[in-house]
Image (cartoon, rainbow, N blue to C red):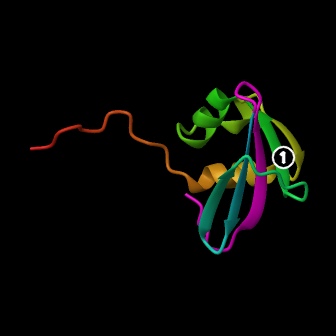
Amino acid sequence: RAFAGRAAFTIQIVLTDFDEKHLITVENGVLIHEQGIVDPNATATVTLKREVLLQTLLAGAPLALAAIETQGNGDVYGQLASFIEPADPNFNIVTP
C-alpha cells in the first residue's frame, strides 16, 4: 500500500446514481471527506456510480476495468485507492 503522508490533493467525486457530490482532501497524512461541498479548483473531478466507487476504493477492483470519467489529474483517484486496504470479506464475527 502507498503512504499518504506526503500526498496533497483534492478530488471532487460526483455520484451520478445518487445525485451526490463529495470532496475528498488528502494532506499531511489526513483524509477529509465533505459531502455536498464543491471545489472548482479540485485536483480532479471523478464522475461514477456509487457501486463503482465502492468496488474500486473498498473492494480493490482494478481501476482500468471501472466506468470512471475523470477531469483534471485522473491519477489522483488511483493514488487515493492505493491508500485504502481492501476489507477481508471472510472476517470472523465472533472469535474464541
User: Which element is circle 1 on?
Assistant: strand
31 vs 50: above or below = below
Most foreground residue, 28 or 66: 28
* Residue depicted at x 67% and y 74%: 6
* Residue depicted at x 63% and y 49%: 81
Left or right of 75 on screen, residue 88:
left
Which quadrant of the rendered structure holds the C terminus? top left
Left or right of 4 on screen, residue 17:
right
Q: Position of residue 34 (x, y in %)?
A: 67, 53
Q: Position of residue 93 (x, y in %)?
A: 23, 37
Q: Does residue 39 show up magenta in the picture?
A: no
Residue designated by label 1: 45
Residue kind at label 1, given as amino acid type? Thr
Q: Position of residue 73 (x, y in %)?
A: 86, 53
* Residue depicted at x 76% and y 51%: 37
Q: Quadrant of residue 66?
A: top right
Most foreground residue, 95 or 64: 95
55 vs 4: above or below = above
Most foreground residue, 32 or 73: 32
Q: Position of residue 58 (x, y in %)?
A: 54, 41
Which quadrant of the rendered structure holds the N terminus? bottom right
Most foreground residue, 26 or 38: 38
87 vs 3: above or below = above
Q: Does residue 7 show up magenta in the picture?
A: yes
Name, please, the residue furthest toward the top: 17
Neighbor class of circle 1 (other Cα within 10 Å; few <14, some 14-19, many 20+) is many
7 vs 68: above or below = below
Name, please, the residue furthest toward the front: 36
Q: Quadrant of residue 9?
A: bottom right
Left or right of 80 on screen, residue 69:
right
- Residue interval drawn in magenta: 1-19
Left or right of 93 on screen, residue 6:
right
